[in-house]
Amino acid sequence: MREKFFTTKNITMTAVFTAISFVLYMFVKFPLPFLFPAFLDVQFSEMPALLAGFMMGPVWGCLVIILKCLLKMPFTSTACVGEFGDMIMGVALVLASALIYRKFRTKKGAIIALIAGTLAETAVAVLVNGLLLIPFYAKAFGWDAIVGMLTSLFPSVTRESIYLYYLPLSVVPFNLMRLSVCSLITFFVYKHLHRLIDRMFAPRSSQ
């Protein structure tokens, strides 16, 4: 079983998916300041981890998330707190999705898995932001700075009401939108990519 798990294919594909995920995490991101606070960058770096989780199992998918975040930490601007939060949220997505899909390997199973993963990460994102990220940024930059970044979208926000505005009106819709895009792309490319990779790693027949 150990030899079957640590195959050349699994290790190689994990490295490839991690590299793609890291590039998406570092460079392919953009804000939507008319919808969400400007410090929330839309990025789709969980998508390669979802594909890895569907193809190779939840352990490998979660490993892509962990490695992506570890590679980003030397470039951190948040004392690694932001990357740690992203790691927790990404693992919630991949673990929920890949575990369900491993049990129900059908189109319907894939849809249920991706919806469950999206909801799982969104719920964890609320907890991570409420318990870790907001307190950290408030301590690092001050509550006035945090509130000031939200007033363009929520003019009535105060320090006392920041959680009531930011979590349900920014964190939840932001993650639902972003992860829905990741899930849709994963759903439509997974089978085609899986068949292509299987052909690439198929044993060569002797001539």
Image (tube, rainbow, N blue to C red):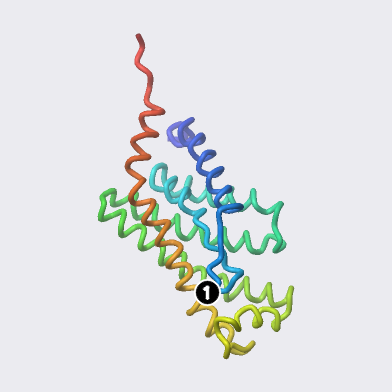
In terms of secondary structure, where does tag 1 sit? loop
Give the residue type at disc 1: Phe
The part of the image, by quadrant, that contains residue 116 is: bottom left
- Which quadrant holds the N terminus? top left
Q: Is residue 200 above or below residue 121?
A: above
Is 52 on the left-hand or right-hand side of 86? left
Q: Position of residue 113 (x, y in %)?
A: 34, 57
Residue corresponding to mark 1: 34
Between 6 and 81, the one nearer to me in the picture: 81
Q: Is residue 135 above or below residue 206?
A: below
Is the residue marked by circle 1 packed among few (<14), some (14-19), or many (20+) residues within 10 Å?
A: few
Q: Residue at x 57, y 51 (%)?
A: 66
Q: Residue at x 70, y 63 (%)?
A: 78
Q: Position of residue 118 (x, y in %)?
A: 41, 63
Q: Position of residue 96 (x, y in %)?
A: 41, 58
Q: Residue at x 49, y 56 (%)?
A: 44
Is 71 on the left-hand or right-hand side of 30? right
Between 163 and 24, the one nearer to me in the picture: 24
Q: Is residue 56 above or below residue 199?
A: below
Is 60 on the left-hand or right-hand side of 104? right
Q: Position of residue 47 (x, y in %)?
A: 46, 52
Between 196 and 34, the one nearer to me in the picture: 34
